[in-house]
Image (cartoon, rainbow, N blue to C red):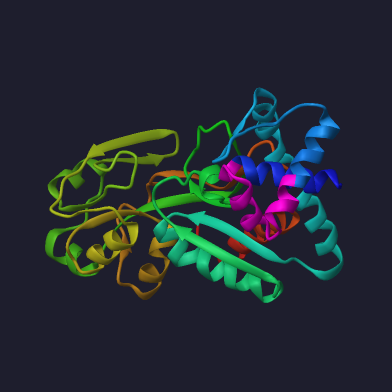
Amino acid sequence: MDIIDGLRAFVATAQTGSFTAAADQLGVSNRLTSKYVAELEARLGVRLFQRTTRKVGLTPAGEDLLARAPALLDDLDDVLADVAEGSRGFSGVIRISAPVTFGEIYVGAMLGRFAESNPGLTFDLRLSDGYADLAAEGIDLAFRLGRSEMLSLKSRKLGEFQSLAVASPGYIAAHGNPRIPEELQAHSCIVDTNRRTPRRWVFHRGEAEYTVQVQGRFHVNSARAAVELAAAGLGIAHAPRFALCAALATGRLVPVMPELRGEAGPLSAVYLEGRALPRKVRALIDFALEDIRSADIL
């Protein structure tokens, strides 16, 4: 028996609770799955399962092995895939998570550019403004805006996003152009509830920091929606530059208080700590780092 086959049979049986379900998962016979597990037990000299007529349950030794074996098998698969990809190119699936607006505006198109030179790859992009659980959802890579305090994740900084206060020319003509942050209190501001402090807007000039509490009729959980409302003349928005590029370029929006810097923070690629990063994921991170610089969206 190949010990790897034995470990795969053991993990599948432990995770599904039966030899039959494990055999279906592995694509082999029930008899062969049971044989692999029995041979693994004989090789280790310990019983891994308590067997009944209806199901199998883990022994303490089985629980210890289950705590380590899945990661070992994943790492082995990654190593084998890396070796194979080195000669024939990347293959398989990369599962990616990203914030909704950033994903729609940038990540989707970036993956298209990466895919052009990697025809063997498949991409599963999941957009959500909540932080995905990378381990539970099987995510290989997540793009995150702002700082993450999760110790189970490693990160690579790709750049620094900047925010701007903006309004439409029509809004400014009708309501005036605020010159200092305090004057925003007299204006209708569009509140993006995805921000950490939605109604508390922070600006900087050099080392000085200015904070203002804003109010407005429109509260939305999307930077893209906030930008569209501002472009329609319905108020002043405070949004990251990547969400504003098109509207600024066409003149639908203009900066408010352009001499002040709005909120800023890191844009990072994050992945799980404690595992070797597959070459295809490393290649995607390297590509994103260079692509973001050339796209000039931050």
**Residue stretch in magenta:** 15-34
Residue 296 locus on image (x, y percent): 54, 63
Q: Can residue 162 be seen at all in this image of the molecule?
A: yes
Taking the spot 27% from the left edge, 59% from the top edge, the residue there is 226
Q: Please tell me which residue is depicted at 21% across the width and 69% down the height of the picture.
A: 232
Residue 140 visible? no
Image quadrant where residue 96 sits = bottom right
Q: Position of residue 189 (x, y in %)?
A: 20, 52
Q: Residue furthest front?
A: 53
Q: Is residue 294 left or right of residue 88?
A: left
Q: Is residue 16 magenta?
A: yes
Majority secondary structure in the magenta region: helix
- In this rendered view, identify the residue nearer to me: 29 or 93: 29
Q: Is 189 on the left-hand or right-hand side of 40?
A: left
Residue 42 point in image, percent of width and height: 83, 33
Tell me where residue 230 appears, x and y as whole percent.
24, 63
Is 197 drawn above or below residue 255 in the view shown? above
Left or right: 212 in relation to 97 = left
The quarter of the picture where residue 68 lies is: top right
Q: Is residue 30 magenta?
A: yes
Q: Nearer the viewer, residue 23 or 249?
A: 23
Residue 206 vertical position relative to residue 31 in the rendered view, above or below: above
